[in-house]
Amino acid sequence: MSRSPSLPDRPHRDIDPDLPDDERLEALRNHFVDLVEVNDQLSEQLAEAEQRREQLRGEVDRVERENEALKSSSLYIATVEDVLDDEVVVKQHGNNQEVLTELSPRLADRITAGDRVAVNDSFAIQTILEAETDARAQSMEITEKPAVGYEDIGGIDEQVREVREAVEQPLAQPEIFEEVGIDPPSGVLLYGPPGTGKTMLAKAVANKTDATFIKMAGSELVRKFIGEGSRLVRDLFEMAREREPAIIFIDEIDAIATTRTESKTSGDAEVQRTMMQLLSEMDGFEARGEIRIIAATNRFDMLDRAILRPGRFDRLIEVPEPDRDGREQILEIHTRGMNVGDDIDFATLADDTEGYSGADIESLATEAGMFAIRNDRDEVRHEDFLEALEKIENDDSSDVVSSAGYFYQ
Ligand SMILES: Nc1ncnc2c1ncn2[C@@H]1O[C@H](COP(=O)(O)OP(=O)(O)OP(=O)(O)O)[C@@H](O)[C@H]1O
C-alpha cells in the first residue's frame, strides 16, 4: 500500500565566479526561482502524504472496531454438512437453515463433514467445536449398573410395585405382553415433590434388569446447550439404542415440556423444538423393545398435556412425601450402615419428622452422625438425632424441610 512519491530534482546550478556582476545576479535569481518551485512541489507532496496518513489512520480504527465487534459478538452453532473445494455447507442448529459459506484457508484442512462449528452473523466459520461425543458425555449420565436396589427405597412400596410392572416386566418378560396381546406403557412419568425417590426408582429398575441407565436433565438441555436440545434428544435415543437394554431417565421433564406460552421468544421456540423431537422419538418407538423411558417432574401442573397422550407418557405414578411409617422405614434404611446405639427410637423420630422427604431424612441421619463425631463418640445415639433435628429446624439457610413448600399436583 505504501506509495513513495518521487522527489523533484534538486536544483543545481554552477555559477561562474568570473561572470560579470549583472549576469551572476541574473543566474542567482533564476536559481532562487527554481528553489522556490521545488519547495512548492515538496510542500504539496508533504500535504498529500499527510492526507494519506489520515486516511490510513481512519482505516486502522475501522478495522480495530470491526475486530472488537467480532470478538465480542455471539456466535451460532452449526453443523458442517458438506465440504466442497473452498466452501462448505453448514446447517444452523435451532432453525435448521442451510447455507453455503466460504471456508477460510486457516480451517480448510481441519474441517470435515459432521463437525460442529461456531459461525458468525454472516455464517463465516469462526471455530470448530469439540467432538460431539464430548457434548453427549457432558449432557448425559450413563451408568452400566446403578448401585441402587428396591430394598434401598422406603415408604413407597406401592410405587415400587407399579414401576416394576410398567418398566421391569416389559424388559424382563416381554413375551407375557405378546401372549396377552397388549403393549406395555410407552413411558412412565413419576411426579411428586423433590427428594422422594423418583431417581432411585428409575435406577433400581435399571439395576434389576441389567439395563444401562441413561439420565438427562431437562433443565440442562435447555440451559446449557442452547440450540442443541433437539439434537441431544436424538443423541439420547441413539445412545440408548446402542446400549440396549436401556432405561432412559429424563429428570425435570417440565423444563422441556411446559405448557405452551404465548410469548414467541427464540428460547421458547427452542424448548418447543426439543419437546417435539422427544415426542417424535417416542411416537416412532417400538413399544415392546428393549428401551424403556421414565421421566420425572415435581411440577406436574406445568406439563404440556401433549406428552401424556397414549403412546407417550401414558403411565402416571405419583411419588408422594413419605407418611409416618414411610419415614420410619427410610430412617432405618439410612442408618443401616451407621454405628447406631440401641437407644434410638425410630418411631418417635418418624413422628418428629413430619413433612420430611427421603432426601431430608438422609441429611438428618448424616447430621446426627456429625453430632456423634463432635461429641467424641463413634456411636450415634438418639440424642444426636434430636440435636440434628433442632439444628435443621433452626437453620434458615438449610433447604431441608423446604420440600413441603414445593408446588405439585
Ligand atoms: N423413598 C426413599 N427411600 C430412601 N431414600 C430416599 C427416598 N427418597 C429419597 N431418598 C434419598 O434422597 C436422595 C435423593 O432422592 P432422589 O434423587 O431419588 O429424589 P427425586 O425424587 O428424584 O428428587 P428430585 O425431584 O429432586 O430429582 C436419594 O439418594 C436417597 O438417599
Image (cartoon, helix red, strand yellow):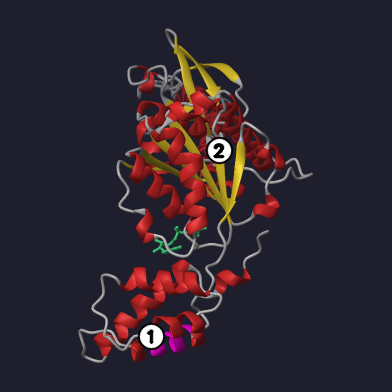
Q: Callout 2 environment at 10 Å: few (<14), some (14 to 19), or many (20+)?
A: many
At label 2, the amino acid type is Gly
What residue is pinned by disc 1? 345
Which SS class for mark 2? strand
At label 1, the amino acid type is Asp
Q: Position of residue 395 (x, y in %)?
A: 49, 84
Of 162 and 143, the residue lying toward us:
162
Q: Which residues are magenta?
A: 385-392
Residue 324 shows in the view: yes
What residue is pinned by disc 2? 187
Q: Position of residue 189 (x, y in %)?
A: 57, 46
Q: Quadrant of the N terminus?
A: top left
Is 388 contained in the magenta span?
A: yes
Q: Is residue 168 above or below residue 252?
A: above
Q: Position of residue 233 (x, y in %)?
A: 51, 33
Q: Quadrant of ligand 1?
A: bottom left
Which is more foreground, mark 1 or mark 2?
1
Q: Is residue 74 above or below residue 392?
A: above
> Mark 1 or mark 2: which comes first in sequence?
2
